[in-house]
Image (cartoon, rainbow, N blue to C red):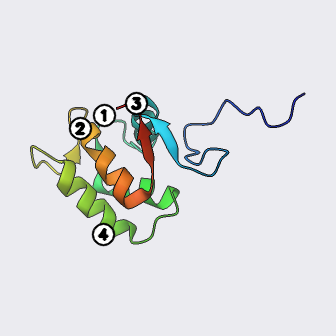
Amino acid sequence: MAIGHHHHHTVNKVGQSDGKREMTMDQFIEWLQGFDKDNDGRISQDELKEAVRATGGWFSTWKSKRGVKSADLNKDGFIDQNEITRLVEFARKQLGMRIVGC
């Protein structure tokens, strides 16, 4: 068994082996959907707060409020499928993630 060939990252592990948080848009959406606890297809502020915590981010309540506010186009308090891509900028700035190929 060769050492160092870990191509299969679980969805909840954000950090890649090189220490950078880098993923494709599809992986980012899949990762976020892992926090959709009630499976309603939307990300609530509390669910986004858990995502912030999972990345080791500080100020998770404040950041999740800002994230929802910045991405929530219809102002219903949730990030739905049409708005989820708007969280990419939030993830870059607030979570230090790199979303590639978008």
Instruction: Indicate which disc, 2 or 4, sits on the residue closer to the N terminus.
Output: 4
Q: CA distance from mark 2 to mark 4?
A: 20 Å
SS type, badge 2: loop
- Tell how many labels: 4
Q: Which residue is mark 4?
A: 62
Instruction: Indicate which disc, 1 or 4, sits on the residue closer to the N terminus.
Output: 1
- Which amino acid type is marked by label 3? Gly
Q: What percent of the width, then of the height, locates residue 62?
A: 30, 69
Which quadrant of the rendered structure holds the C terminus?
A: top left
Residue 80, disc: 2
Q: CA distance from mark 4 to mark 3?
A: 28 Å
**Pick the front one: 8 or 2:** 2
Please indicate whether residue 61 sits to the left or right of residue 56 in the image: left
Task: Please name the residue shown 57% across and 50% down the image.
Answer: 20
Instruction: Indicate which disc, 1 or 2, sits on the residue closer to the N terminus.
Output: 1
Task: Please name the residue shown 66% across and 30% down the image.
Answer: 8
Please indicate whether residue 17 sits to the left or right of residue 73 in the image: right
Residue 41, disc: 1
Place residue 96 in its image quadrant.
bottom left
Q: CA distance from mark 1 to mark 4?
A: 23 Å
**Mark 1 vs mark 3: in front:** 3
Place residue 26 in its image quadrant.
top left
Tag 4 near tag 3, CB within 8 Å: no
- Which amino acid type is marked by label 1? Gly
Q: CA distance from mark 1 to mark 2?
A: 7 Å
SS type, badge 1: loop
Q: Which residue is mark 3?
A: 101
